[in-house]
Image (cartoon, rainbow, N blue to C red):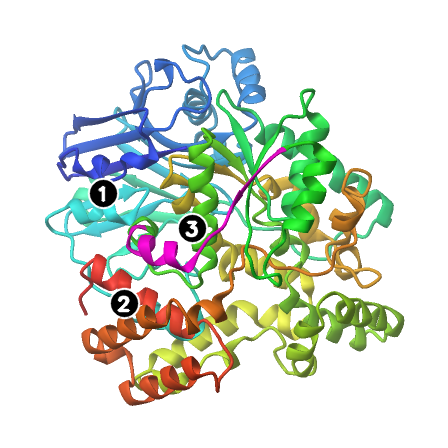
Amino acid sequence: MCGIWFSVFKDVSSAVLDVIYHRGPDDGELVKVQSAHGPICIGHRRLSIIDISHDGHQPMRDTQHSLWITYNGEIYNYLELRRYLESVGHAFKTKTDTEVILKSYIHWGRECLTHFEGMFSFVIYDQEKEEVFAARDPFGIKPLYLYHKGGFLCFASEIKQFKQLQEFSSALHRQRAYDFLRHGLFDHSQDTLFQDVRQIRGGEYCFLRLHDFKKQGDFHISKWYSLPASNTLDIPFEKAVHEFRDLFYDSVKKHLISDVPVGFCLSGGLDSSSIVCAANSMSSSHNLKTVSACYDDAYYDESKYIEQVSQSTKCAANFVYPSQEQLLKEIRKITWHQDEPFGSMSIFAQWTVFQEAKALGLKVMLDGQGADEQLAGYLFMIPHHIKWLLRKRKYIEFFQILFGFIAGDPQFVLQSAGRIFNKNPCDKDALFRKEFFAKNDCELLAQQEKQEALKTAQASNDIGALCASYIESHHLPMLLHYEDRNSMAHSIEARVPFLDRKLVELSISLGHLYKYQNGYTKTLLREAMQDILPKAIYKRRSKLGFSVPETSWMKNGLRPYVSTRISKVMDEHPECFDKSALLKYLDSSMGGSKHFDFTLWRIASFGEWSDIFKVNT
């Protein structure tokens, strides 16, 4: 995992790489190439993971075909691809997956993307043909941003790289800011909270010819990958479990490939525990290292589950104890690394896990992102499934899951019972108070965008379509953004085995009753891992993730900070807020008369981000 830079017709200094030194402290270079139409700058910061010799230095050049590449990520099937490419006549000079990408592009052209298994963002420059090809992996695990201004175009791993350009202005994208503040939507579109910066989204590529770009400013962004249709596979449940197990074990095995130490994020939940237990079953030494976040508050503390996994696998368990004092101390640093505001304090908990991993000397960490999205594991998806059961008159299954969740998380069931019969059971707009914000047309636009993305799933109660929406736009891209920035801030490569393309496609193609059975979520995963999971994990129904005691923190140690930050941001961005309404809500929330939601934290985080990046409206 690394950091990249590529600019067309824009000469830049090494500052565009220096600002992301954390992404690649092992090596780096900025190469400048003069084309017939203007300067081309290709930059790279390297975090050495596979083939840590100098052979992996980037930018890498294929002199025979006049190709340059700057690349961030891992291609897990690169050895298989290399063997095939060698069999058809391609010669290799290194043992890197970077060179495999170059040779694949030479052999297949843009179709090379369909052959890659892994996470990646890269830019290839064909110096002879004067063409640029930039691409991102199917689910957007690795970031790739684009900044187009006047006659030049730039690609980067982090938005802060663009701030090193004299022409860059930190102008607020008001629509996206409103989506974040009002609806908690983030990374759900091609736009960012910066007006002039957009993303190459997961499963997209960008192609341009220098001549056309110079003459007309033409460049094209196309979709190269889409998820398959949902609920298209009807096979015996036992066969589905077998196929899921085989794909998952194969994915974990590939994600363990590394020439540097590998560790594991372990929350004590089903997903991360499955990764640790699967990896342990493949290890001869059984000396895995895990890092977990724990709390004094018993409701949020998952140490009893973590200890079950630790005892079962004999792993070396390491613990961190995130505190509100530490959050206050590091909030500006976290926000700077994130590039944009973040929606909950769980990002801080994840930050502390990677912080400890770095102290332990770990350069690769495996994490459980992506399981909940493909297997409908989020509790807020349950009302949607329940409505489907009632619609299909599956009353036995209805009572099984209802009683199962009452036993597993009665507080959640009580809070969401009224949503079962709502028109849109997964719509969370009711959590956010629109009276906070100045009246404008943004609300209607944001609502239309969100509803458009979800309407197919909501109209049909199709859990597969709902999962696809959360993978492609409504949830997973946001979590992958947070994970990338938190891990790379500490020069660690985060890997996510559940986002193996074949595994995700299998999960999406299977319907409701492959995901929910006997009152349990994620049935496929539970049954696939039953033989190696501790019983307490296999039977666990409660779910927390990287949760922190937000309600308590907001009303105690964080209260002065949040109140002060919100007061400042109201003055700095009056066009975004109805000041009197927000002050009233702030007072009632901190006083305890209103139930906690994330709105106040998002506003405070928005204010911190706006101050750090000098955002203007």
Q: As rendered, which of 44 and 343 lies closer to the eye?
A: 343
The disc label shown at residue 607, or none: 2
**Residue topped by disc 3:** 481
Q: Residue 212 carries which label?
A: 1
Residue 351 in percent (x, y) is at: 43, 48
* Residue 296 in picture, x, y percent from top left: 55, 57
Of 330 and 498, nearer the camera is: 330
- Nearest the viewer among 596 and 519 is 596
Residue 265 lies, in percent from the top left, at 56, 42
Magenta span has 438?
no
Image quadrant where residue 407 sits: bottom right
- Which residue: 15% across, 47% down? 151
Name, please, the residue furthest toward the right: 396
Q: Is residue 612 above or below residue 428?
A: above
Q: Residue at x 42, y 41 (%)?
A: 355
Do the residues under discs 1 and 3 have CB atoms within 8 angstroms? no
Local packing at callout 1 (Cα closer than 10 Å; few below 14, some 14-19, many 20+) is few
Quarter of the C terminus within the rendering:
bottom left
Circle nearer the N terminus (2, 1)? 1
Spatial CA span between label 2 and label 3: 19 Å
Question: Which is nearer the N-term, disc 1 or disc 3?
Answer: 1
Q: Residue 606 carries which label?
A: none
In whole angstroms, how far apart are the C-alphas of marks 1 and 3? 32 Å
Magenta part of the chain: 316-333
| Residue 44 can be seen in this image | yes
Q: Is residue 490 left or right of residue 613?
A: right
Residue 320 forms part of the magenta stretch: yes
